Amino acid sequence: MSLFSRPSVFTKSENCPSEVPPKAGRRGTLSPEPPLSATFQEAILASSSRVRDSLPEQHRAHFETLRQEIIDFAQAHNIPRESLAKPDVLREAASKLSTPDLQRLANLLERFEHLLVKKEPWKNEEALEYAEEFYHLKKQYDSQVSLLKEVGILSKEGAILGIDGKQYPVPTLEQTASRLFERRGELSTKHNQGFTKLLLVPFGMSLDSLQETLKQFLLDHKKSNPDFDLDTNRPLWAWEDYQGADMGDSPNIVYHPQSFTQQGHGGKTKMEILEEQARGRWTLPPTARSATGGTTSVGVAEGSETGTPGWTIHLFQPSDPTDSHSSGFAPIPRQGQGTPQGDENPRPPLEAGKTPIEYLSILREAQDDSDSPYFQESGMTPEDWIIAFMIHLTETGKPFDDAWNPTNKESISYLTGAFFHSSILVPYAYWGRDFRQAGLRRYVPHRRDEGIGARFSVIV
C-alpha cells in the first residue's frame, strides 16, 4: 500500500480536518514498498538521470512531468524539497495544507510511486477511450507533439524553458484526455458547436523565442516547398513592442484582460500566471468561467491532474464545419459569410467587422451566462496564434488568416486574449500575402475594420 493510502500518515488537525482516503484500490494494487524508498529519494532529491534512464524511453517525459510538479508544489507551499524524503517531516508539513492541497500532494506522490515501481504511468483508460471517441485525441496529440519537437520548442526530455528559467514538460496524452473527460459534461455543448480541434500551447516560453521559432519554421517550410511564396529576408514582421513584451518587472503585455484600459484592465502578466499554476491552482481566464467559477483545483476529485504548468490546452473549431476532425483551424468569416454551429445551443458565427472592445464585450457578457452560445470561450494570445499558424500550415499547406486571399476571403485576427496595457493597443496577427510574410501588429481598441475579426477558443 502507498504511503499516502495509509490513514496514519496524515492525521486530522485544525488545519487539515480530514484524512486522505485510501486510493490504491481505485488504481489497482501498488507495490508494498512505500514511496519514500531509496529510489524515490534519489528520483526527487538527487540528479534524476539514473532513475529516469531506468524507465522505458517513452515514459521518461512523464517522469519529468511528475517530478517537476512535485517539486513545484513543494516550493509553492513552503515545503523543503528534502522533506519529501522524510516521513515525519513531510507529515508535519502536510498537516498545514488544506484538504484539496493535501489530496493533490498525495495524488502526485502516488502516481510517481506507480511510475517508479511499475515502469509505466498509471492510465485512466476510461478517459483515454472517451477522448479518442469524441476528439480523435491521440492522432491530434501525437502530430502536435511531433511538430513541437521538430521545430525545437520541445527539448529531448519533452519540456520547454519558461521565462522563469524552469523546465515545463509537455502535458501527457493522459493528462489531456483526463482534462477532457473530467469536464465532459460542461464541454458537451462546446463539442456540439464544433470545438474539437486540439491546440497545445507552450505559454510559459518567452514570446521572443516563439517569434524566432516561427521565422525558422517559415524558412524551413520554404525549403521543403519551393513554391511557397515567402520573403526569406523577413519572414515575420513584428511591431517592435513585441520584443521582450512578456519579460521583466513591468512587462508591456498582459493576458486575459477584462477591459482594454490602461488602469483596471484586470489582466495578468505571464509570470503571475506561471506562479499561480505553481501554487497548485490552475485558473481559467475570467471570460472562460466554468461550473467551478473559473478556478479548478489541481489534482483533487479522483486524483485528477487538472493543471499543466507552463502550458495551455485549447479546443478550436476545425477548418471544415461539416467535419469535426478536419485539418487546420476555422477561418474568421467576413460579415454575412458565417454559418451557425450546434443544435443544442446554436452558436452564431463570430464574423469580422467589430471593434476589439465589442469582441471582448461578447466574452464578458457570456462569462456568467451559461445559456450564452459563447459561454466558456476565450480570446487568443500571440503565443496561441504562433503555434496555431505552424500547425495550420503543416496540416493544410495553406497560411493561417490569409486575409488577402482573393478566392477565399479570410480575416485578420485580433488577439483579444492579450493587451499592450501601457500603449492601450490590442495585438493582431495575419498572413500578408502581398508582403509574403506573417505579421504581428497592434490596433486601437475602439476602431473597426471589415477585414479584422476575432477567433475564440475553449481552454480546458
Image (tube, grey):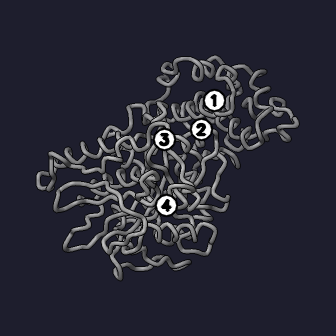
Number of marks in the image? 4
The residue under label 2 is 278
Instruction: From this view, report whether residue 87 is shown above or below residue 280.
Output: above
Nearest to the observer: residue 57 or residue 413: 413
Q: CA distance from mark 4 to mark 1?
A: 34 Å
- Looking at marks 4 and 1 on the same chain, the residue that comes earlier in the sequence is marked by 1
In the image, taking residue 135 as reference, residue 229 lies left or right, namely left
Q: CA distance from mark 4 to mark 3?
A: 17 Å
| Element assignment for label 4 | loop
Q: CA distance from mark 2 to mark 4?
A: 27 Å
Label 1: how many Cα within 10 Å (few below 14, some 14–19, many 20+): some
- Looking at marks 3 and 2 on the same chain, the residue that comes earlier in the sequence is marked by 3
| Residue at the spot 56% in from the left edge and 78% down from the top edge | 344
Three-letter amino acid code at the position of disc 4: Phe
Q: CA distance from mark 3 to mark 2?
A: 21 Å
Three-letter amino acid code at the position of disc 2: Ala
Label 3: how many Cα within 10 Å (few below 14, some 14–19, many 20+): few
Q: Are marks 2 and 4 in contact (CB under 8 Å)?
A: no
The residue under label 1 is 75
Percent coordinates x, y for residue 354 in the rendering = 41, 73
Instruction: From this view, report whether residue 412 is shown above or below residue 121.
Output: below
Residue 260's disc is 4
- Looking at marks 1 and 2 on the same chain, the residue that comes earlier in the sequence is marked by 1
Q: Are marks 4 and 1 in contact (CB under 8 Å)?
A: no
Percent coordinates x, y for residue 258 in the rendering = 55, 60
- Looking at marks 1 and 3 on the same chain, the residue that comes earlier in the sequence is marked by 1
